[in-house]
Amino acid sequence: MPLQTDGTVTENRRIKSLYFALGIYCPSIADRIKPGQFVMLKVSDDNSPLLRRPFSVYKSYPEAHPEKRKRGHLFILYKEVGKGTRKMTSLRKGQKVDLIGPLGNGFTPPPLPSSASSILIGGGMGIVSLYPLVEAFDTGGLFVFIGGKAEDDVMCVEDFRKFSSDIFIATEDGSLGFQGTVVDLFLSQKKRFKGEGKYYLYACGPVAMLKAVAGVVEIKKFVSQASLEARMGCGFGACWGCVVKTNHPKTPYQRVCENGPVFPLENIAWE
Ligand SMILES: Cc1cc2nc3c(=O)[nH]c(=O)nc-3n(C[C@H](O)[C@H](O)[C@H](O)COP(=O)(O)OP(=O)(O)OC[C@H]3O[C@@H](n4cnc5c(N)ncnc54)[C@H](O)[C@@H]3O)c2cc1C
Ligand code: FES
């Protein structure tokens, strides 16, 4: 069950251009959150904007974490895109924030032990929700594809390097790495994944990116999960403001917040 609780801001700093890292001390959520789950954050005390905003949890440290100073902390990476995220930039250390979480179903890591390799494909801020997975992996290999419009939009590279040397970067304007979309980049490397056996593929990013991924992976070879981004009203299944069309025979319209945000890639009815 998700909790509505207070957290205390421990830091809120600009990483680069429009990107910020928000640290919150909130042991009750940090203890329970799983890879791919999210929180709904009340971004200001003045009810403007009225609705909470959804954010993936980038890193979280449970109460039993060996490093005492990290215990109970969680981190959100966010991009300033509108009214709510602009308000977030003025949160100060020591300030209380109200949040609901953990929400959603999260990713299912590969079954253990597994010699299969995993592939992560993240577009823009989508890469944030994939990061907690790497700490849960104990698999044969890890390939990480990170994309953004330009160099400034490429996030989290150094953190992923701690887990894999197979990091591939794409920017649409060519300012860093491969020039093109992250899906073009994945396609250019797809011959690496020709061997026997399955690959576990995890993707998060804009709908157009996920649709493109769905178009280039074979269901038999890639066990694929996608985390969807949607505008959300409540975040816990009450308002039906976040529905997505799926291939489910009885209930094709499913709520991203409640039934997702992670879905098997082939279950989404891409239109
Ligand atoms: C499950 C989930 C996890 C998310 N995790 C993160 C994260 O880790 N870091 C992060 O920076 N953002 C994340 N987002 C997106 C984030 O919630 C939005 O950027 C935020 O709500 C925008 O609020 P705003 O008031 O600043 O923008 P608004 O003023 O409401 O809108 C500004 C612009 O952003 C677009 N926008 C707003 N919300 C979304 C959305 N949910 N998806 C796509 N476009 C949107 C609008 O169409 C508009 O163009 C996540 C969204 C979901 C659903
Ligand atoms: S955001 Fe309200 S049902 Fe999903």
Image (spheres, grey):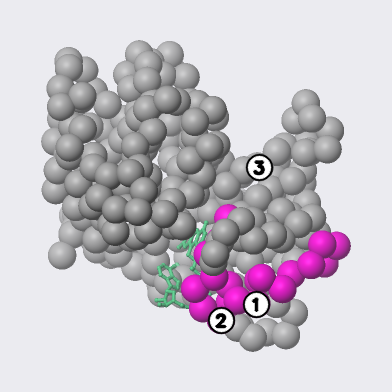
Q: Quadrant of residue 164?
A: top left
Q: Amino acid at mark 1?
A: Lys
Report if the beta carbon of the residue with label 1 is closer than 8 angstroms to ligand 1.
yes
In depth, the one of 211 and 104 nearer the eye is 211
Q: Residues within 10 Å of mark 1 (few under 14, many from 20)?
A: some
The residue at the point 63 percent across, 66 percent down is 41
CA distance for labels 2 and 1: 6 Å
Q: Is 270 placed above or below 137 here?
A: below
Residue at the front extreme of this rendering: 175
**Picture coordinates of residue 27 (x, y %)?**
77, 46
Q: Is residue 61 left or right of residue 56?
A: right
Q: Which residue is mark 2?
A: 83
Any part of residue 270 in sight:
yes
Residue range highlighted in magenta: 77-96
CA distance for labels 1 and 3: 23 Å
**Picture coordinates of residue 82 (x, y %)?**
51, 78
Q: Mark on residue 23?
A: none
The residue at the point 43 percent across, 31 percent down is 109
Residue 75 magenta-highlighted: no
1 or 3: tag closer to the N-terminus: 3
2 or 3: tag closer to the N-terminus: 3
Q: Residues within 10 Å of mark 3 (few under 14, many from 20)?
A: many
Q: Which residue is mark 1?
A: 87
The residue at the point 60 percent across, 83 percent down is 49
Q: Is 122 placed above or below 89 here?
A: above
Marks 2/1 in contact by CB < 8 Å: the verdict is: yes
Q: Is residue 129 left or right of residue 141?
A: right
Q: Amino acid at mark 3?
A: Ser
Q: Amino acid at mark 2?
A: Lys
Report if the beta carbon of the residue with label 2 is closer than 8 angstroms to ligand 1.
yes
Q: Secondary structure at mark 3?
A: strand
Q: Mark on residue 60?
A: 3
